[in-house]
Amino acid sequence: MAMNRRQMMGLALLVSALLALAWPTSAQERKQPGAAKRPSRASTWVAIKGGSFLMGSNAELDEKPVRRVTVQAFEITRSEVTNAQYKRCLRAGACRAPEWAEEENDRNLKTGKDFHYKGFTGSKQPVVGVTHRDALKFCRWAGGQLPTEAEWEFAARSGGKQRRYPWGDQAPTCARAVMKHGGDGCGKKRTWAVCSRAAGNTSQGLCDMAGNVSEFVMDCSPGSYVKAPTDGSAWTRGACSSRRLRGGAWSSISTTLRATARDGLSRGNRGRDVGFRCTRSTVGKAGIRWVPIPGGTFKMGSIKGRPDERPVHQVKVGSFFMTKSEITVAQYRACNRAGICSLPKTVSYNNWSKKGRDRHPINGVDWKQARAFCAWAEGRLPSEAEWEYAARSGGKDRQFPWGDEQGTCARAVTDEPGTQGPSGETDGCGEDRTWPVCSKPAGNTSQGLCDMAGNVWEWVEDCWHRDYTGAPTDGKAWNTGCHSHYRINRGGSWNYPAKNMRATRRDHNSATLKSSDVGFRCAK
């Protein structure tokens, strides 16, 4: 029988109420020590340094042959994705409901009960009842992807160490993993809240890489590693009718919790013992290394500085990424070869045409050329607020990236008296030029950004204003009411004294300037 409008509205309200009851809203996840907060929708991410390792083992046929695999640096979510995290994606319209929350699922909405998934829907429990495609959609919404099988094993073995389990070689028990020991799920017959077994964490602090739920990875499920990639990429050859699972689950015995153990699931299938976590590469085009900068509020400017650094004003900056170093000659050359970036100016002090300068910062580029490169690298120029916030190690009250100690050649490539080189000049710490990027690690920010003081001035997105009167407070670039066509430079350079390297110091030049002491870095 057809329903009238009022009946349809009533049914819709009933559906919403049942979903709300089935899927409780969680409190904000607690911050975990030792993990980097990442600008993403997937909670806490952990940086994993790249490296080479021996992947596989001789324990099972599908783990052979053991071979050396090289994995690039990446980040991975500290925990398996939780119901609360997945719910945010569902609300955004980017994810499909898991099986136990589907509107057409007879097991819940028609009866108001779901015995099959009873006990699995807590906000801090890993999401289950999702397919490989559902997992991939979430990770993409969160700004990442599913890990490759090589990335997963490298992380589960604490950076590729020769160990059987994430914690070492000791046999699994319920002290370290949610597993089949004293009954499924350590007697609870279900999953536990993520990160409930800290003793089973990896050296980098990843939780539940053994047990709780088996985890989808990107790869297909061939029977062995014969002809498998050795560059850390996903193996997705052929029809790919099934996908790999890793890590074992609450219903798994100890042998399937090994870091090298492999399982699989047919495409489109799902269950109560399968979930996932996400990864994201920190290496972009041309080998660019992106560093996450957690957002926050800080006081921008300085009452002790020049008039254009005033008034000091509070700014709220959202989370973002910034390139670890100033963009290098080699990186800019890749953009030029791609037909995107035009040639820099070539004069005596510019690096473009000099042999052996691939790792030096690109200079001799104007503001538009800097913007073109950043767009090619899937980023943009940082706003002036983002730049200062990052240079002050997340908005800390300090004069320089490293603190309040005056800048010297121990921390920055600058013009320091008494450092004359063969040419008799003190510019560039006696070298009379730039240095390779990241040559002065003692001057890095707390987040690891290099050369935020010295080497080359850096273009930012903002145009120049005489001071901060009327400046935005949301961290975005200030490009209204501009003073002519001038753009802001930040950070000082190799041929300027240390006083110009203060994190609040501002300079400005014509947007068409191509100078030997001006380069840039990117944000996104």
Image (cartoon, rainbow, N blue to C red):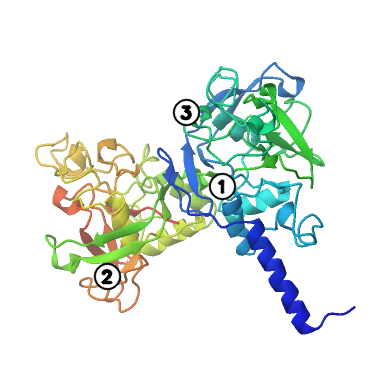
Q: Nearer the viewer, residue 189 or 41?
A: 189
Q: What is the distance, in whole Å, between disc 3 and disc 1 at their CAs?
A: 22 Å
Local SS, label 1: loop
Local SS, label 3: loop
Q: Nearer the viewer, residue 399 or 216?
A: 216
Q: Residues within 10 Å of mark 1 (few under 14, many from 20)?
A: many
Q: Quadrant of residue 461?
A: bottom left
**Residue holding disc 3:** 203
**Residue holding disc 2:** 464
Q: Residues within 10 Å of mark 2 (few under 14, many from 20)?
A: many
Q: Which mark is residue 124?
A: 1
Q: What is the distance, in whole Å, between disc 3 and disc 2 at their CAs?
A: 47 Å
> Looking at the image, is mark 3 or mark 1 earlier in the sequence?
1
Compared with 514, 49 (above or below) is: above
Q: Which mark is residue 336?
A: none
Compared with 517, 35 (above or below) is: above
What amino acid is at disc 3?
A: Ser
> How far from the left and from the top, in percent, is residue 206?
51, 35
